[in-house]
């Protein structure tokens, strides 16, 4: 239905403009916030995204770690394989 | 592949002292026997590192290094040792290593478990555009009766209230600490001040949403204990919210951000000189993910009656210097 084509194109253009406006507003908010800015509903999402980890920061956690030396020994005996144990002050998958 | 917390495995500061004091956890003894042949030897002190051993606990190789190449070389040596020892047919038996105490056994089923991320914040003019790479994790535990402290007994829309001191203390003493670059010391009760406040912002027949705000100020001049001392001074603001299902007594959502500055002095400060920014984010941990059931680093000091303590408290053992007989 060719009469709908101009309407469709107008909607696409409007959506693009809204997205650009939203991104520029977000960028402006991001730039104006400093560590002295008080926490509030307007900047909560930004600080949350900053502090929490991204997927590529946690790649090493996706390995099939057993969570204790004992569990590692059990697995090693089951598979008849040596055990690699990574031991740190603070559990490596927690606070180290 | 296994990971574990080494302080408990090595029996505190010195495994010789642990064993002389009657320490007998099979998992710890198995580790101590194995690790005493490793890169830090049989003396006291830390046994941090990467170890390779057989299923019956026989040492193969170990290293403590940040060099990937060095670790790879060590692993290759371990594999070569394993191949020499590998019997032709019989499987290697498992070492006697069933633990008699693990902190994870105090996991508060039906309570609230939060996953904590701590990260330094950039102090540049546009910090949100420059993410600091240093971060760390921890977990916060509250048992079911402590969970009910988050919720007013007769909530009303718009109601404002102070959260009980127990909840503030848990965060302030054990979790609003500088761990972005590594483990750090906790604050004592008399070293913290502040409070958490709630406001009911949504109320339904079987659920309510509460906004949380708060401030915390911590000061300490203590010397290091077990190599850990808390930051001299931290000033923090807190903001977040949670949704609580009053039928199931569970949190549908819990998010908290704390942001503040760490000062190198415990003196009164009027500016941000000699300080740096830090942030914490808390959200509900996934109880079905085993790694999110790990215990909080300082659970041993929570002082909560529901935390099962080991028969031999490691922090009460005398600390000896490394290699001291």
Image: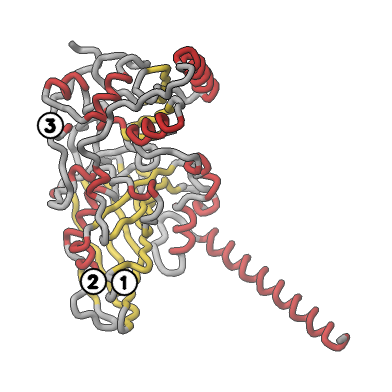
Q: Name the residue located 66 percent from the left edge and 70 percent from the top edge.
A: A19
Which residue has dot 1 on it? B244
Question: Callout 3: helix, strand or loop?
Answer: helix
Looking at the image, which is closer to me, B58 or B292? B58
Residue B151 is left or right of residue A52, and the answer is: left
Looking at the image, which is closer to me, B153 or B128? B153
Pointer 3 or 1: first along the chain: 1
Locate residue B39, reporting x and y percent: 37, 16
Question: Callout 2: helix, strand or loop?
Answer: loop
Residue at mark 3: chain: B
Q: Name the residue located 34 percent from the left edge and 71 percent from the top edge.
A: B243
Which residue has dot 2 on it? B151
Q: Is residue B320 above or below residue B168?
A: above
Locate residue B77, reporting x and y percent: 50, 15
Spatial CA distance of label 2 from label 3 is: 37 Å
Which residue has dot 3 on it? B316
Residue at mark 1: chain: B
């Amino acid at each position: 239905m060719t009469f709908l084509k101009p309407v469709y194109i107008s909607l696409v253009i409007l959506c693009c403009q809204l997205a650009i406006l939203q991104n520029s507003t977000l960028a402006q908010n991001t730039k104006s916030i400093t560590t002295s800015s008080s926490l509030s509903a307007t900047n909560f999402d930004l600080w949350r995204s900053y502090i929490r980890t991204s997927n590529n920061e946690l790649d090493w956690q996706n390995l099939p770690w057993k969570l204790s030396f004992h569990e590692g020994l059990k697995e090693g005996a089951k598979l008849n394989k040596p055990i690699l144990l990574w031991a740190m002050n603070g559990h490596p998958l927690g606070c180290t | 592949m296994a990971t574990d917390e080494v302080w408990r495995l090595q029996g505190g500061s010195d495994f010789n002292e642990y064993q002389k004091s009657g320490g007998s956890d099979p998992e710890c003894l198995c580790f101590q026997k194995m690790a005493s042949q490793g890169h830090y030897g049989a003396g006291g002190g830390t046994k941090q590192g990467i170890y390779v051993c057989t299923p019956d606990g026989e040492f193969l190789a170990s290293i403590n290094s940040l060099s990937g190449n060095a670790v790879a070389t060590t692993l290759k040596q371990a594999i070569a040792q394993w191949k020499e020892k590998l019997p032709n047919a019989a499987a290697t038996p498992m070492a006697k290593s069933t633990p008699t105490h693990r902190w994870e056994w105090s996991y508060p089923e039906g309570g609230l478990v939060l996953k904590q991320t701590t990260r330094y914040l950039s102090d540049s003019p546009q910090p949100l555009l420059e993410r600091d790479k240093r971060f760390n994790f921890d977990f916060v535990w509250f048992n079911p009766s402590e969970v009910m402290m988050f919720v007013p007994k007769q909530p009303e829309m718009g109601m404002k209230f102070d959260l009980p001191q127990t909840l503030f203390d848990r965060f302030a003493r054990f979790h609003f600490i500088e761990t972005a670059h590594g483990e750090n010391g906790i604050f004592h009760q008399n070293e913290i001040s502040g409070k958490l406040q709630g406001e009911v912002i949504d109320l339904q027949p079987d659920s309510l949403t509460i906004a949380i705000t708060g401030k915390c100020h911590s000061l300490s001049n203590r010397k290091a204990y077990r190599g850990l001392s808390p930051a001299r001074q931290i000033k923090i603001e807190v903001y977040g919210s949670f949704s609580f299902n009053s039928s199931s007594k569970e949190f549908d959502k819990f998010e908290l951000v704390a942001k503040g500055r760490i000062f190198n002095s415990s003196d009164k400060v009027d500016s941000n000189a000699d300080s740096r920014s830090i942030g914490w984010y808390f959200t509900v941990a996934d109880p079905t993910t085993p790694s999110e059931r790990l215990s909080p680093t300082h659970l041993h000091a929570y002082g909560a009656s529901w935390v099962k303590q080991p028969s031999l408290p490691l922090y009460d053992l005398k600390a000896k210097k490394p290699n001291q007989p």
